[in-house]
Image (tube, grey):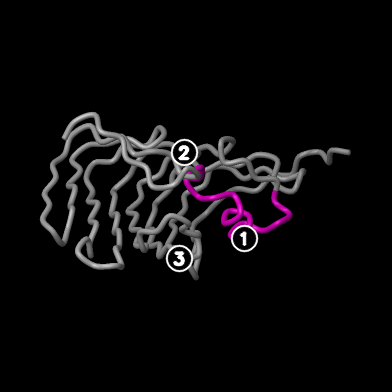
Amino acid sequence: LEGISTSYSESMPPLLVMKGSASFNRYHFDITIEEAEILELKVDNGTIALSGLNSNDQFAEVELNVHGPLSSALQIIPKQKSLLILGQGINFIPQNAEGTTETHLRFTFPIMKDLSFERIEILANASMQGVAIRDVFGFLDLQHGVLSLKANEKDFILSGNIAVSYTHLRA
């Protein structure tokens, strides 16, 4: 496979497969990814497995090793989830985040037309370098972060070090 774009939801950016292979039978459709992109993120390897093709209930499992700009990685998370994770009071715009990430992602979900985010099982392990988020709460800057993330659909564990500096309050 070369130059194939795949997308499941309009709310998520498409994955452009640059190099990979596919196999299928009446039960499964499997894609092995050697090289791909999603936004400005690079995917070194991954898999997309569609199963249950011979039954009423089909499932997808997507597993990707991703690296690149943190801002692109944060844009993949739906806004309502990022606000729940980070807190309602944070002035957070994913595109304004700085730094890089190396992330292992795994998504498992039923294949259905009206898939809600709550039905997606997520597992993410990430290491982030040079993390900076400006103007948090309107008066804080976070910078020089070296962080680790372990997350699933229920837990979000962020650890590491980041410098906090005060900026002037904005009216």
Q: Is mark 1 on a helix, strand or loop?
A: helix
Residue 82 falls within the magenta-colored stretch = yes
Q: Is the magenta stretch mostly helix, strand or loop?
A: helix
Q: In which quarter of the image is residue 122?
A: bottom left
Name the kind of residue labelled 2 in the image.
Ser
> Which residue is at 70% across, 40% downward?
135
Q: Which residue is drawn at 71% across and 45% down?
A: 140
Q: Please report contact status of discs 3 and 2: CB closer than 8 Å, yes or no.
A: no
What whole-number distance in Å separates the C-alpha atoms at marks 3 and 2?
23 Å
Q: What stretch is highlighted in magenta?
A: 74-90
Q: Earlier in the sequence, mark 1 or mark 2?
A: 2
Amino acid on which the number 3 mark rests in the picture: Arg
Q: How crowded is mark 1: few (under 14 residues within 10 Å), some or many (20 or more)?
A: few
Q: Mark 1 points at which residue?
A: 84
Label 1 vs label 3: CA separation?
Answer: 16 Å
Kindly report which numbered mark, 1 or 3, lies closer to the viewer in this rendering.
Answer: 3
Q: Where is residue 69 in the image (x, y as percent from the top left)?
A: 43, 36
Q: Mark 3 points at which residue?
A: 119
